[in-house]
Image (spheres, rainbow, N blue to C red):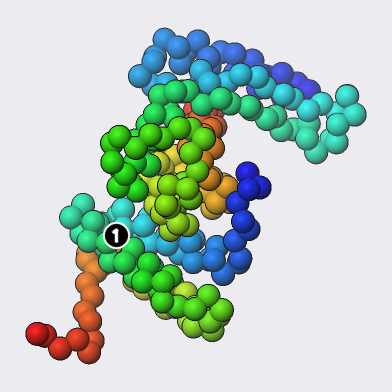
């Protein structure tokens, strides 16, 4: 329990830091954090982990949209929404790999294989990116 | 997230290999990198179009060959990648 509360304190202290540094844009997308505790009868496996639910920021979503457009060679006036599915834009699985690689470079993160195959929409990509950027900030 | 049709193990391996190739290309000079990416992408797309998805033996062979080629590409001594087409007579 001590470690869990320490982690959430760290979260709280991270938040204002990223506000003051907008260019960095790290963590302000955090909406709430759920912590599984063994006290409440959750499986004890969960107690060491905590999950973060993010709603990706508009700027991340826009950046993702730009990259997707560039990668799929879509014209500028194609309207893309966060709910757009890559497959409905004409992307096959190889295109999806390319998009993910491009996103990795752009945001300086590394997406592992399992996650990269779960990405089917712009929103999912943006959420995952925010999560990974957050994890990276935590690790530093 | 479950909306996506599940990929087979072989498909995942192919996509994984493609990722590794693109990753390896990042280590090269920018100009060569573009060239490598276009060659690799053309190769994968061509095979995706032309190879029957049930031809497991051939796909496995291509995977093995690809892994060998990837090893060579990863070496820092490898600077560029080139292709030639056999059997095409010049016009």
Q: In the rendered view of the protein, which quadrant contains the N terminus of chain A? A: top right
Q: Which residue is mark 1?
A: B37
The chain holding disc 1 is: B
Task: Find residue B1 and report its horizontal and vertical position in percent.
Answer: 63, 44
Q: Residue furthest left?
A: B91
Helix, strand or loop status at disc 1: helix
Disc 1 residue crowd, few under 14, some 14–19, many 20+, Cα 10 Å: some
Q: Visible in this render: residue A140? A: no
- A24 displayed left or right of A140: left
Quadrant in the picture for residue A11: top right
Residue for point 18% across, 55% down: B31
Q: Visible in this render: residue A102? A: yes
- Given residues A10 and B35, the one toward you in this image is B35
Residue for point 42% across, 52% down: A90
Task: Find residue B91 and report its horizontal and vertical position in percent.
Answer: 9, 85
- Given residues A10 and A25, the one toward you in this image is A25
Residue for point 41% across, 10% down: A20
Task: Find residue B79 and report its horizontal and vertical position in percent.
Answer: 22, 64
């Amino acid at each position: 329990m001590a470690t869990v509360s320490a982690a959430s304190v760290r979260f709280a202290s991270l938040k204002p830091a990223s506000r003051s540094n907008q260019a960095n844009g790290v963590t302000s997308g955090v909406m709430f954090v759920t912590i599984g505790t063994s006290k409440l009868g959750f499986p004890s496996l969960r107690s060491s982990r905590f999950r973060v639910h993010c709603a990706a920021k508009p700027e991340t979503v826009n950046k993702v949209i730009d990259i997707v457009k560039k990668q799929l060679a879509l014209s500028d006036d194609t309207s893309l929404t966060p709910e757009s599915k890559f497959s409905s834009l004409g992307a096959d699985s190889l295109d999806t790999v390319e998009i993910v690689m491009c996103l990795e470079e752009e945001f300086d993160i590394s997406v592992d294989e399992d996650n990269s195959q779960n990405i089917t929409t712009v929103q999912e990509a943006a959420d995952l990116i925010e999560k990974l950027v957050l994890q990276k900030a935590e690790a530093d | 997230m479950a909306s996506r049709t599940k990929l087979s193990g072989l498909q995942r391996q192919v996509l994984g290999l493609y990722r590794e190739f693109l990753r390896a290309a990042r280590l090269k000079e920018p100009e060569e990198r573009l060239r490598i990416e276009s060659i690799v992408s053309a190769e994968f797309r061509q095979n995706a179009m032309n190879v029957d998805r049930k031809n497991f033996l051939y796909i496995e062979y291509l995977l093995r060959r690809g892994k060998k080629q990837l090893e060579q590409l990863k070496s820092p001594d490898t600077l560029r990648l080139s292709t030639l087409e056999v059997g095409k007579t010049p016009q």
